[in-house]
Image (cartoon, grey):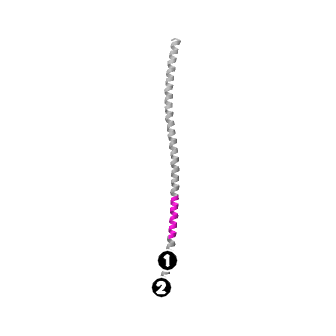
Amino acid sequence: MNDSADMKSAEAELDRAVDSLEVGIDALLLRMQKLETGAQDSDAFRQDRVKLAAQLDEMAADAQAAKDRLAAREAEFAKLTQDSEAELDRVMTVVRGALQNASGG
């Protein structure tokens, strides 16, 4: 073989190597794009998770505040009930006393 044939053979080999490299690079770029998309989706998922956790915490705090208000109202009504019962007992005692006095008792 002569130098010209060797050069053409080397050039053909180089072209095949470059083509193979381009195919490999294209495959790597495609894979990298998929990974980047996955990373972005994962990041969006994390952000959504943080937002949902914050909303859940806020809802839990609201529920606890409502529970505390309800307990306070129940205590207030229980106190009013006790006070009303005590007042009714006093009124009934006065009425009984008045009825006994009126009947000569």
- Amino acid found under the numbered disc labelled 2: Gln
Q: Which SS class for mark 2?
A: helix
Residue at (49, 35) in percent of width and height: 34
Q: What are the residue bounds of the magenta stretch?
A: 65-80
Task: Looking at the picture, tell me which residue is in the foreground, 9 or 103.
Answer: 103
Instruction: Classify mark 1: residues with Cα within 10 Å, few (<14), some (14-19) or many (20+).
Output: few
| Disc sitting over residue 100 in the figure | 2
Q: Are marks 2 and 1 in contact (CB under 8 Å)?
A: no
Residue at (51, 75) in percent of width and height: 87
Task: Looking at the picture, tell me which residue is in the foreground, 54 or 98.
Answer: 98
Q: Main secondary structure of the magenta part?
A: helix
Q: Is residue 12 placed above or below 50 in the rendered structure?
A: above
Q: Is residue 54 placed above or below 14 in the rendered structure?
A: below
Residue at (51, 46) in percent of width and height: 49
Q: Is residue 83 placed above or below 72 in the rendered structure?
A: below
Say which residue label 1 marks.
89
Residue at (51, 63) in percent of width and height: 71
How many numbered circles are shown? 2
Q: Is residue 1 placed above or below 88 in the rendered structure?
A: above
Magenta run includes residue 68: yes
x then y, percent, for residue 62: 52, 56
Q: Which SS class for mark 1?
A: helix
Task: Please identify the residue farthest to the top as the structure is shown.
Answer: 2
Instruction: Classify mark 2: residues with Cα within 10 Å, few (<14), some (14-19) or many (20+).
Output: few
Task: Please identify the residue farthest to the bottom as the structure is shown.
Answer: 104
- Amino acid found under the numbered disc labelled 1: Asp
Q: CA distance from mark 2 to mark 1?
A: 16 Å
